[in-house]
């Protein structure tokens, strides 16, 4: 005889997190920047340079910016991001902030 037990694991939603600094220098630590969180249904993440030009944009969670712009390393600077997400309940959340790139 055997007993089969089915268990559901509910992973709670966590806070959405965008790091404020990254160092894309190839050392394997903090080399990319992206959006982290586990309850994102829709996403629009845009990073701008100080002149308002888009340097990175994605609608795919897990896609990250590696600090390159048009095939060249972006300069050490402070960049601005705009983030719009929709959670599993349909709630829209908008935020923005700064990201510092240092090598």
Image (cartoon, helix red, strand yellow):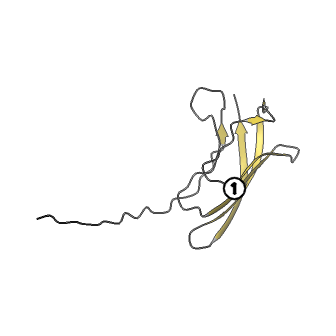
Q: Quadrant of the C terminus?
A: top right
Say which quarter of the image contains residue 10. bottom left
Q: Could you tell me residue 72's position as x and y percent?
A: 79, 30
Towards the viewer: 99 or 55: 55
Mark 1, secondary structure of its residue: loop
Q: Residue furthest front?
A: 1
Q: Could you tell me residue 53's position as x and y percent?
A: 86, 46
Q: Quadrant of the N terminus?
A: bottom left
Q: Could you tell me residue 8's position as x and y percent?
A: 35, 66
Q: Tell me: residue 38, above or below residue 6.
A: above
Q: Could you tell me residue 19's position as x and y percent?
A: 62, 45
Total labels: the figure holds: 1
* Residue drawn at x 37%, y 63% as measured from the top left: 9
Say which quarter of the image contains residue 25. top right
> With 54 as the anchor, is 91 left or right in this view?
left
> With 31 as the anchor, is 48 left or right in this view?
right
Say which quarter of the image contains residue 51. top right
| Residue, disc 1 | 59
> With 23 as the anchor, is 72 left or right in this view?
right
Q: Residue furthest left?
A: 1
* Residue drawn at x 57%, y 30% as measured from the top left: 28
* Residue drawn at x 73%, y 47% as measured from the top left: 98
Towards the viewer: 50 or 25: 25
Please rate how many residues cluster around mark 1, counting C-alpha atoms within 10 Å: few if below 14, some from 14 to 19, many from 20. Answer: some
* Residue drawn at x 14%, y 64% as measured from the top left: 2
């Amino acid at each position: 005889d055997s007993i089969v037990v089915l268990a559901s694991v509910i992973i709670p939603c966590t806070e959405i997190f965008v790091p404020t600094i990254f160092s894309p220098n190839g050392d394997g630590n903090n080399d990319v920047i992206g959006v982290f969180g586990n309850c994102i249904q829709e996403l629009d993440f845009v990073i701008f340079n100080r002149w308002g030009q888009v340097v990175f944009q994605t609608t795919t969670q897990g896609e990250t910016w590696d600090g390159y712009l048009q095939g060249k390393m972006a300069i050490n600077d402070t960049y601005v991001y705009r983030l719009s997400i929709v959670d599993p309940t349909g709630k829209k959340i908008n935020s923005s902030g700064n990201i510092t790139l240092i090598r």
